């Protein structure tokens, strides 16, 4: 019987959906560390360390690299709210649900939103994006790097250069892709990038790493308006329109994260500890090694699913290695299989939304969850639950093929 006075005791689960995935125990331990006052010199050292760690994660020299409190969309909102003034034109190339989210947020800040769409399961040719920029002349191009809703990763290496040629700023949502898919903020000329912890970074949802360059700094400082009760003497406001959100006001967040230590919000202490540990884990493993791990484990999952004669979703050339879409076989009720995997094996895989609702499952191999034993457990459970649903795969073929793939990749 349920008793409200019982301690929390979540059932053991293996989270292999599109996020959140299991947090690394080191991150959970870091979160259990004692709180510090936000201006304690020991805490501000941690803040500076976080800035420097995330510069490495994002492969950038951007001074403005810090954390925005809130889930990944807090990062998105902080950029779009601070950069986009009412009436500014924003172009969003949409290839899944999160492109629609960028449009929605841009619309709320009263942008003149233009979008182009490609079928879910495909990505854009850079030329198409350049043509749209020529046609719409946006101030900002906002795009997702990896859209978990479709499992696709948009190549970005040419988009930054295109935006520069046409005088547009480029914002990238890398929530689902950071450290699972290559991301080079400076080399690719990405002006602002945001992320979340709950996918390949192996942390809990609740804080959003962000980085942006001087081009963005210049735009947002024009809109700087420091809150009356905390402003120091001599602060001069910008002459641009005030940013509609106090919480997501980048100029105030910049003052908070700089030597000025403006007393803006109370930092989410435990989430900062988590973010710090997530970045340390990435850098200790090595960014390239981590990308290779996501490739290797994702490829073994794909080999297993293929051997089970299941159809994979979308343009596999552009699939993120860390999320795989599986077409639900005809006659199988997708949610019954997912429910069975959770109930009998404690494994969570993802459903999908929009045009893909009921059509595909999404299996995540991200961060701490991205490991051989998890892929083998997931394939075995999926095969058993498909059998219960009346769909027969070649018995044992999935696990065997994945084992072979791991074997040959470890020899490579
Ligand atoms: C690409 C992308 N952007 C944004 C989000 C939204 O993140 P959150 O739910 O943490 O606000 C997600 C979450 O799945 C995502 O995959």
Image (cartoon, helix red, strand yellow):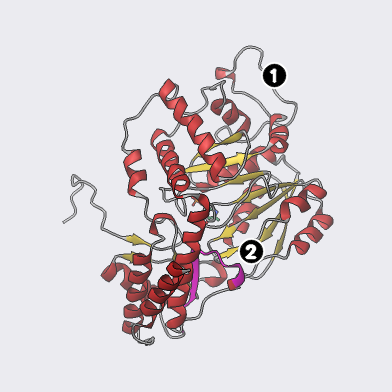
State yes or no: discs 1 and 2 in contact (Cβ < 8 Å): no
x, y percent for residue 393:
39, 86
**Residue 336 visible in the current orientation:** no
Label 2: element kind = loop
Would you name the residue on which mark 2 appears? 95
Q: Which of 283 and 67 is in front in this view?
A: 283
**Quarter occupied by the N terminus:** bottom left
Q: Is residue 371 left or right of residue 228?
A: left
The percent coordinates of residue 300 (x first, y second) are 44, 71
| Separation of residues labelled 1 and 2 (CA atoms) | 42 Å
Q: Does the magenta stretch include residue 322?
A: yes
Answer whether residue 67 is magenta in the image: no
Coordinates of residue 132 in the picture (x, y in percent): 79, 59
Image point 56% across, 57% down: which residue? Answer: 181
Q: Crowding near pointer 1: few (<14 within 10 Å), some, many (20+)? A: few
Q: Is mark 1 on a helix, strand or loop?
A: loop
């Amino acid at each position: 019987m349920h008793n409200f006075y019982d301690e929390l005791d979540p059932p053991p689960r293996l989270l292999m959906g599109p996020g959140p995935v299991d947090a690394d125990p080191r991150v959970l331990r870091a979160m259990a560390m004692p709180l510090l006052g936000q201006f304690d010199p020991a805490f501000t050292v941690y803040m500076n360390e976080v800035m420097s760690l995330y510069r490495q994660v994002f492969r950038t020299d951007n001074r403005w690299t810090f954390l925005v409190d809130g889930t990944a969309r807090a990062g998105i909102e902080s950029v779009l709210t601070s950069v986009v003034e009412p009436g500014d034109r924003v172009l969003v190339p949409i290839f899944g649900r999160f492109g629609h989210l960028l449009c929605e947020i841009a619309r709320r800040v009263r942008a003149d939103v233009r979008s182009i769409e490609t079928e879910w399961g495909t990505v854009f040719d850079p030329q198409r994006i350049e043509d749209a920029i020529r046609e719409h002349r946006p101030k900002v191009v906002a795009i997702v790097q990896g859209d978990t809703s479709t499992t696709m990763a948009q190549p970005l290496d040419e988009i930054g250069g295109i935006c520069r040629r046409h005088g547009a700023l480029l914002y990238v949502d890398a929530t689902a892709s950071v450290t699972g898919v290559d991301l080079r903020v400076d080399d690719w000329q990405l002006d602002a990038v945001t992320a979340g912890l709950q996918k390949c970074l192996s942390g809990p949802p609740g804080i959003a790493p962000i980085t942006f360059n001087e081009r963005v700094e210049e735009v947002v400082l024009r809109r700087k308006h420091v809150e009356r009760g905390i402003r120091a003497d001599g602060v001069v406001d910008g002459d641009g329109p005030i940013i509609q959100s106090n919480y997501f006001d980048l100029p105030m967040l910049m003052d908070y994260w700089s030597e000025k230590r403006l007393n803006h919000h109370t930092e989410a202490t435990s989430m900062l500890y988590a973010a710090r540990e997530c970045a340390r884990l990435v850098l200790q493993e090595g960014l390239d090694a981590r990308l290779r791990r996501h490739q290797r484990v994702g490829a073994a999952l794909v080999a297993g699913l293929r051997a089970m004669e299941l159809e994979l979703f979308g343009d596999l050339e552009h699939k993120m290695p860390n999320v795989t879409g599986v077409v639900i076989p005809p006659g199988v009720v997708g949610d019954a299989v997912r429910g069975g995997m959770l109930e009998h094996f404690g494994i969570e895989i993802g459903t999908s939304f929009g045009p893909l609702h009921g059509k595909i499952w999404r299996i995540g191999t991200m961060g701490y969850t991205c490991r051989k034993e998890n892929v083998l457990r997931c394939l075995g459970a999926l095969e058993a639950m498909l059998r219960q649903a009346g769909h027969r795969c070649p018995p044992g073929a999935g696990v065997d093929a994945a084992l072979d793939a791991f074997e040959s990749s470890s020899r490579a």
